Image (spheres, helix red, strand yellow):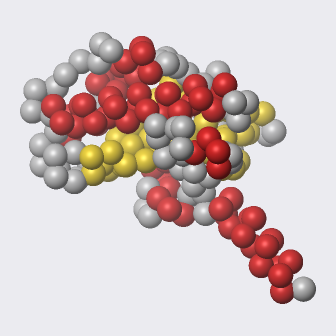
Amino acid sequence: MKRKYFTGILFVLPLLMSFTFLKGLDKKVDREIKDEFEVADYSHEGVVVPQELQGKLPSNVTVQNFIKLQHSGNLLGYAYIDKAPSKTAEFDYLVIFDKDLKIARTKVLVYREEYGGEIGSRRWLRQFTGKSKASELNHIAAISGATISVRSMKNAVKDILASVEILQKHNVL
């Protein structure tokens, strides 16, 4: 009896934790998702990546940071939340994909440095909108004084786009 209970908890726990790892970012993520898809509520579940694919992905994709978004049983899209390095710290970012797996929105959720915070501007982040392949990011504009952060955000988005391509190829998405 105890074994069945324990196994059930291990199966359900990752799904319940899908936003808990965000530690205070859940409200920001929730607001961005609702705003992007113009919905008052939605459901989400973590995307399960087979173990044999994990090593092939450039990004760290888990049920906690890559989630499928639905509203009334209809697919809205996906959201990916992660951290990327800046000069001396890390920043948290969000990439929202539409149902066709094109980038609908990117957002820098928390930037922890004195310099380079310009990467959080909507105007600069709009360059990623509509992209669906890593190769489409070759012409992202630089920002004076934010070279490291720009490069880091660009590389992070390239990695998740490449990961999404692999997941599509293997029918995970």
Where is residue 126 drawn, in percent x and y?
37, 22
Q: Of residues 70 and 53, which is closer to you in this image?
A: 53
Quadrant holding the N terminus: bottom right
What's the residue at 69%, 30% (across, down)? Answer: 170
What's the residue at 84%, 86% (across, down)? Answer: 2
Quick check: 116 left or right of 125?
left
Quick check: 166 left or right of 83?
right
Q: Of residues 105 and 36, which is closer to you in this image?
A: 105
Where is residue 166 drawn, in percent x and y?
59, 29
Q: Of residues 41 and 48, which is closer to you in this image?
A: 48
Where is residue 13 drawn, in percent x and y?
68, 67
Quadrant holding the C terminus: top right
Tell which residue pokes out farthest to the left in this image. 145
Q: Can residue 148 be seen in the rendering of this structure?
A: yes
Quick check: 133 left or right of 93?
right
Examine the image and state in which quarter residue 164 appears.
top right
Vertical relation: 46 (above or below) 135: below
